[in-house]
Amino acid sequence: MAPTAVTARRIPEDLPFVLRHSVGKRALLFGVLILLIGLMLGCPLGAAVSGGEADRLVLLAVPAFMLLFALLLGFQLWMITSGGPVLAVGPHGLWIKTRPTRGQAIWLPWAAIEHIYPRRWALERMLCVKPRDPRVASGLGAFTALDSGLQQAFYGTGFTATINFADRPEEEIMRAVAGYAAGRCRVG
């Protein structure tokens, strides 16, 4: 039988160390992506269109695509950053989001955690929390199972929190986690 997990809709903010998304860092990344998409569409299209009035109307597709991508990435930015904190750490354990977007969080006492480590995939650097018993992730819902399976493939665990797009530097995050873990689980 899988252990009963303590879950909540949002991570409580009353623990000593709370980590949130940095909207500015994430918005900067998305802005650069939108500009790159515009350049990738605009440069070849502009070079191909070098003449008549009808051909110039084709260039209107570039701003239309950029607007579409801006709306999609803006929605994604809202989904990622509006769900509250991504991690909260205290002397008895930690809360971590179970999904990368809005959703639930899970409480893991230090005794239930095997290893906490940073890992990079593409542009994202994550703090990964591997529980001693992988069954703690069971029963968290179908969408969480899907997200957790993808995270498991990329990071080795379904419980992750952003490091490089967080509101605090990585060194401070790792120092706080190691300090509160106090040797009760491997950190690093």
Image (cartoon, rainbow, N blue to C red):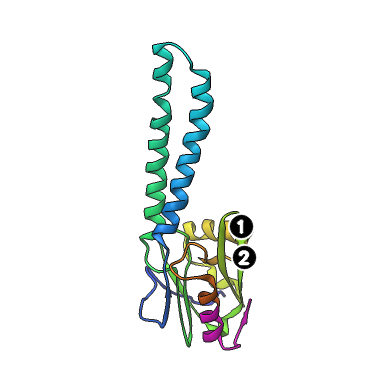
16 drawn magenta: no
The C terminus - image quarter: bottom right
The residue closer to the viewer here, 182 or 168, is 168
Give left or right: position of 158 versus 77: right
Q: Is residue 137 in sight in this rendering?
A: yes
Q: Which residues are magenta?
A: 175-188
The residue closer to the viewer here, 54 or 3, is 54
Residue depicted at x 49% and y 37%: 37
The residue closer to the viewer here, 120 or 56, is 56
Label 2, on which residue? 119
| Disc marking residue 121 | 1
Q: Is residue 162 above or below residue 62?
A: below
Q: Is residue 90 above or below residue 36?
A: below
Give left or right: position of 38 versus 151: left
| Disc marking residue 155 | none
The N terminus - image quarter: bottom right
The spot of residue 63 in percent (x, y) is: 39, 31
Q: Residues within 10 Å of mark 1 (few under 14, many from 20)?
A: few
The spot of residue 73 in percent (x, y) is: 42, 46
Amino acid of disc 1: Trp
Q: Quadrant of residue 119?
A: bottom right
Total marks shown come to 2
Q: Residues within 10 Å of mark 2 (few under 14, many from 20)?
A: some
The spot of residue 164 in percent (x, y) is: 52, 63
Helix or strand or loop: what does disc 1 sit on?
strand
Q: Is residue 102 in sight in this rendering?
A: no
Amino acid of disc 2: Arg
